[in-house]
Amino acid sequence: MTQLFGDPEQFGEEALRGFAAAHPGHVTPVDGGVVRSGPLDDGRVAVVVGGGCGHYPAFHGLVGPGLAAGAVVGNVFTSPSARQAETVARAAERGGGVLFGFGNYAGDRLNFGMAQERLRAAGLDVRTVVVTDDVASAPAGRRHERRGIAGDFTVFKVAGAAAEEGLDLDGVEEAARRANDRTFSFGVALSGCTLPGADRPLFTVPDGMMAVGLGIHGEPGIEDRPRTDAATLARTLVTRLLEERPAGSAGRVAAILNGLGATKYEELYLLWGHVDAELRAAGLTVVRPEVGELVTSLDMAAVSLTLTWLDEDLERWWCASCDAPGYRRNPALPAAAPRVVEAAAVTGAGAAPPPADEASRRAAATVLQNLRAVQRALHDNADSLGRIDAVAGDGDHGRGMCKGIDAAVRAAGLVAERGGGAATVLTAGADAWADEAGGTSGVLWGVGLRALAEALGDTGAVDGETVAAGVRGALDAVTRLGGARPGDKTLVDALGPLAEQLGAGVAEGLPLGEASRRAAGAATRAAEATASLRPRTGRAAPLAERSLGTPDAGATSLALCARTAAGV
């Protein structure tokens, strides 16, 4: 929800005042909005955009060379008044006339319409282009009823570039109308937004669902559908927009993947990868795509896709330079074709493994059996490991362990299929674990398993002494690299007792299975005992008090893996 505000009724005015103070080189405040600090050349068309606040960078963030000459800004999701629109237009106008641009909402149409009448009565030439890009809000046969959402940005960008190019008011109006006629948007919301001062969102989305056909004023979607993965969502968005392709259009499109406030850039880029693939599969060429927050809705978790079907003029205006507080484009960075970079050869990838005898290949099969059993156990316990980690960490331990073991099983399996011995199979798994999982746990598991692999070798049978020596080697490697010691509340607190008890059991003459089970029990008890410890290293150290009473996630997962392996 919106956390920072003073008087909720003054949120828009206070936010606009702070915006102008932050960007004095770009904008000058006037009653009801802002205009460019550097005025237009005499005779240029003034593109004036507007609507309620809560959509930044629309509308005031788009004032600057190559974009708007001024922006009229109302309170949150509320149309500015006719007087405010008139005031901003008069301040921006330099003799070339005014083009108003805004989304298709009743309050905006009424207030900008009244301002236009007053300005025309005063002798100014004023035109209006209303953006109607939202395909979910009305059928194609009633295009004039559709709302304006993220397509606002495309239409404003084209109009601003046409005005900057020196077109007269007829030309700028025609450019904006052409852009609107060829621009279509479709989006989904995962949660609603909350107005400043409110204690609940304007609408909610049921668990496991997404609201299809979002609006940018906190309106719920047209319908709720089951939430899906990014690839399927991308296909849904693209398929719906391809239905609106104008007759006779070429295959070049401008595309905007727009986040509405709480859907962050990593999520957007993940989704864009799938959207881009869908557009290419449809035979389209995407020109200078934009991925980010361009028309938002406070803190709404939502995303929309906008496509504009380009002609030669629209493409030139879409790619033209501009410089505004909320959006900049440098034409000196052309949309070049991506370089083809040859992937570096991975050492050993696809190559025959070192020679191994039959005994070691049998041991390798047992190694792989252990890894697969551990894989099942980690996936079954991923959520609980994440909850433990979240007490004083970032809650990603379960996911990280699953990613690591999945990579290890894949890599070890490939090497085992080619006849690799125990050491080579486990080394492949160790390296894949470290590479894929990343983070502290990833590298420690990688180095530990590599040390165990070195002890196993690629010839001869594997016995209890070999395994015990390998686990001791893993402990040495982990403590040497990580620097943790017993009592630091890390996986070392479980790995130490595991190595000690395994070595003792083997020395007593116990069978490896029995010695492993006893050692795993010791590791489990030690992991549970970490609940009384305060972490002295790592990310959890600053939150030492918070972690009291909760066992260490790394020690817990290591004990889980030890118990699982002992049962194989």
Image (cartoon, helix red, strand yellow):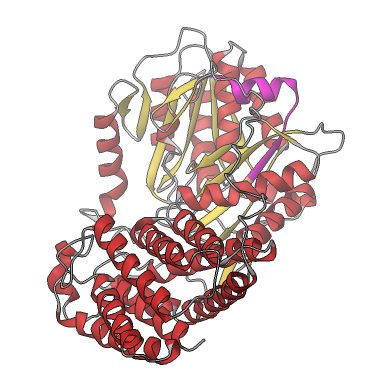
Name the residue: 44% across, 86% down.
566
106 over 290 or under it: above or below: below
Q: Where residue 391 sits: x, y (%)?
A: 26, 73
- Which residue occupies the foreground of this view, 473 or 413? 473
In the displayed structure, does residue 338 sit left or right of residue 422? right
Residue 398: in sight, yes or no? Answer: yes
Q: Would you say residue 341 sits in the magenta stretch?
A: no
Quadrant of the image occupied by residue 289: top right
476 over 510 or under it: above or below: above
- Which residue occupies the foreground of this view, 180 or 501? 501
185 over 205 or under it: above or below: above
What stretch of residues is rendered in magenta? Answer: 306-321
418 over 116 or under it: above or below: below
Q: Where residue 502 sits: x, y (%)?
A: 33, 82
Q: Where residue 254 sits: x, y (%)?
A: 66, 34
Name the residue: 44% across, 68% down.
401
